[in-house]
């Protein structure tokens, strides 16, 4: 067993590391541009929610992942409230195969951050004295796959190639 561990360390086969180091609210804003008049309206509001995922490398093995939500609630084309929030986390990722980095940063990290963002948005809305809005669960894998498919279509359109059905990672080359 010790020989196997020694062989793995000599070959550079170290165990993958994935750690959440910190979660923080990077940005939160709430606007009620038509208050107090809109608070007298009797009609129910319509809600529009937009979610985006982002991130950046902070150091060799340290990454920031972000989930941003914009909630716009309207009554008769007038904004009742607009909430924008960005939840962020710092993650340590090392000894992870390159082809797995983007899915981890685009699916796993946002899935871990989203519950914090949901709570912060609900709390901000509750502080307006309006009923809380609880954001629904999000399938970050589906969002990631949609983004990858859109990028592949865009790349194909730019290259003028027919659909091969294969999505290559950005650093892959065709032979």
Image (tube, grey):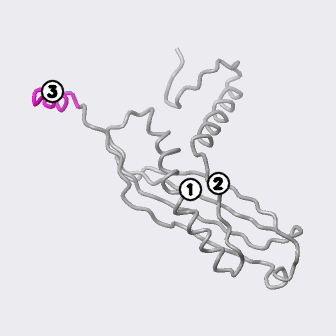
Q: Is residue 11 magenta?
A: yes
Q: Nearer the viewer, mark 3 or mark 1?
A: 3
The percent coordinates of residue 98 (x first, y second) are 41, 34
* Whole-number angstrom distance, CA of label 3 to CA of label 1: 41 Å
The percent coordinates of residue 47 (x first, y second) are 77, 62
- Give neighbour class at mark 3: few <14, some 14-19, many 20+ (Cα, 10 Å): few
Q: Earlier in the sequence, mark 2 or mark 1?
A: 2
Q: Earlier in the sequence, mark 2 or mark 3?
A: 3
Q: Which residue is mark 3?
A: 4
Q: Which residue is mark 2?
A: 51
Span shown in magenta: 1-12
Q: Which residue is mark 1?
A: 67
Q: SS class of the residue under badge 2?
A: strand
User: Contact, CB < 8 Å: mark 2 with mark 1?
Assistant: yes
Q: Is residue 110 left or right of residue 135?
A: left
Q: Earlier in the sequence, mark 3 or mark 1?
A: 3
The percent coordinates of residue 97 (x first, y second) are 38, 33
Seen in the picture, residue 78 relative to 91 is either above or below; the reply is below
Q: SS class of the residue under badge 1?
A: strand
Q: Is residue 131 left or right of residue 170?
A: right
At horizontal 67% and vertical 26% (from top left) the residue drawn is: 156
Q: Is residue 167 left or right of residue 153?
A: left
């Amino acid at each position: 067993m010790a020989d196997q561990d020694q062989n793995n360390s000599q070959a550079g086969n170290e165990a993958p590391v994935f750690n959440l180091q910190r979660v923080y609210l990077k940005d939160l804003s709430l606007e009620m541009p038509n208050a107090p008049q809109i608070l007298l309206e009797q009609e129910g509001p319509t809600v529009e929610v937009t979610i985006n995922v982002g991130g950046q490398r902070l150091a060799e093995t340290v990454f920031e992942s972000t989930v941003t939500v914009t909630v716009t609630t309207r009554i008769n084309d007038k904004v009742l409230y607009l909430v924008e929030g960005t939840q962020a986390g710092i993650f340590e990722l090392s000894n992870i195969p390159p082809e797995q980095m983007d899915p981890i940063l685009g699916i796993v990290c946002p899935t871990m951050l989203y519950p914090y963002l949901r709570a912060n948005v609900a709390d901000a809305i509750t502080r307006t004295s309006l009923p809380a809005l609880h954001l629904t669960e999000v399938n970050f894998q589906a969002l990631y796959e949609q983004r990858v498919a859109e990028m592949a279509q865009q790349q194909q359109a730019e290259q003028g190639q027919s659909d091969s059905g294969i999505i290559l990672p950005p650093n892959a080359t065709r032979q």
